[in-house]
Image (spheres, helix red, strand yellow):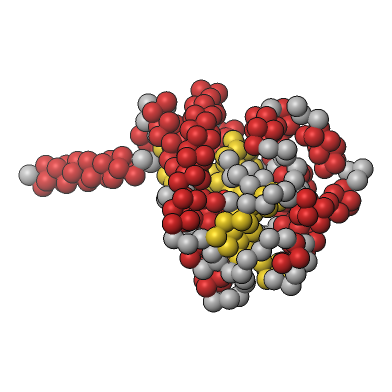
Amino acid sequence: MKKRCIFILNFGLFILISSFVLSCGGPSDGRKIFSLPHVLNTDHPVHKALVKFAEEAEARSGGAIVIKIQPGGTLGNEQELCDNVSNDADAFTKISSTILETKADLAKVYSLPYLFRDEEHMWKVLDGEIGRELLDMALEQNLKGICYFDAGARSFYTKKKVESPGDLQGVKIRVQKSVMMQKLVETLGASPQQIAFSELYTALDTGVVQGAENNIPSYYTQRHYKVAPYYVFDEHVCIPDILLMSASRWNQLSPEEQAVIMESAEAAKEFQKELWKKDNEEQIKKMEAEGVAFTRLKNKDAFVEATKAIYDEFQGTEIMKYVERIRSVE
Ligand code: GCU
């Protein structure tokens, strides 16, 4: 009787533990569960593309690959998230590629002002040979580039109207954790302040900075337009977002699983390209209705001229070779 009781107890315990392991998706059920933290809000088109990426990966792997997205910067700023993938603490992250500067000098290429002629040129470069080479620029730091996402063009937005570099003199402008972005803002005569993305609303609201620069979806989804309602389309840089995976985890995947990741990323990227245009237009209309003043410049010459000197220090470097190759892409 006693033995029977012990057997029933052990069997019950076994069932309990097994169902717990299953619900957690532990290794015993064969599923691979990966984390993907990032800093954007859930209404941002890049977040929506990441959701699509996770859905595609789960469907294409028959449920064997599960990607858990943690939005909103709850797990850290972009530099920390990048470090976490590099150290293998997280499997994936999505960051602005300018953050990769701390891992690979070549990341500076994408932060150069007025590098691309237009959006079509940018995608030809990103989808082509150069883009593919640069995806893996930080492989030695355990960072495998999976794909780019459209992050459009970055423009200035401020508490007071700005129409030319002259209006930016001495104005405190938030920048990302990037030497290149710091230089760019300095070159224009403004005063760069490095502040994490999630802290920017408060910094603008309390006047720690009087402006920032970003694309339309980030300006809108972070509600920055409420506290800095002047947006000038100077479009000084087009820095793509990049989806990164820990290279060591990538190497642990089978060729079939690697194909699932790449095909899912491709599907998510194409989905996001369309969504980006739609969201941009809708968000501009919504902000205009709320009184945001958008300045559409007749030409950007004053900004182009004022930022040209940034290229000087790169003459004769590997970075400049990339610039020349990018410029020659028709
Ligand atoms: C872009 C980019 C984000 C980044 C943000 C920033 O919106 O998509 O990844 O965090 O810029 O300025 O920090």
Q: Residue at x 48, y 65 (%)?
A: 226
Residue 32 in view, yes or no: no
Residue sitting at the far top: 256
Residue at 63% x, 47% y is 153
Q: Residue 127: image x %, image y %?
A: 65, 29
Q: Residue at x 80, y 34 (%)?
A: 327
Q: Is residue 136 left or right of residue 223?
A: right
Residue 218: x and y in percent read 53, 54
Q: Nearer the viewer, residue 137 or 1?
A: 137
Q: Quadrant of residue 191?
A: bottom right
- Of all residues, the one furthest to the left in this rendering is 1
Residue furthest toward the right?
A: 316
**On screen, residue 22 above or below 165:** above
Q: Residue 269's spot in the image, x, y percent?
A: 53, 34
Q: Nearer the viewer, residue 93 or 23?
A: 93
Determine the image quadrant of residue 166: bottom right
Q: Position of residue 77 (x, y in %)?
A: 56, 59
Q: Is residue 29 visible?
A: yes
Quadrant containing the N terminus is: top left
Q: Nearer the viewer, residue 53 or 169?
A: 169
Which of these two is toward me, 85 or 209? 209
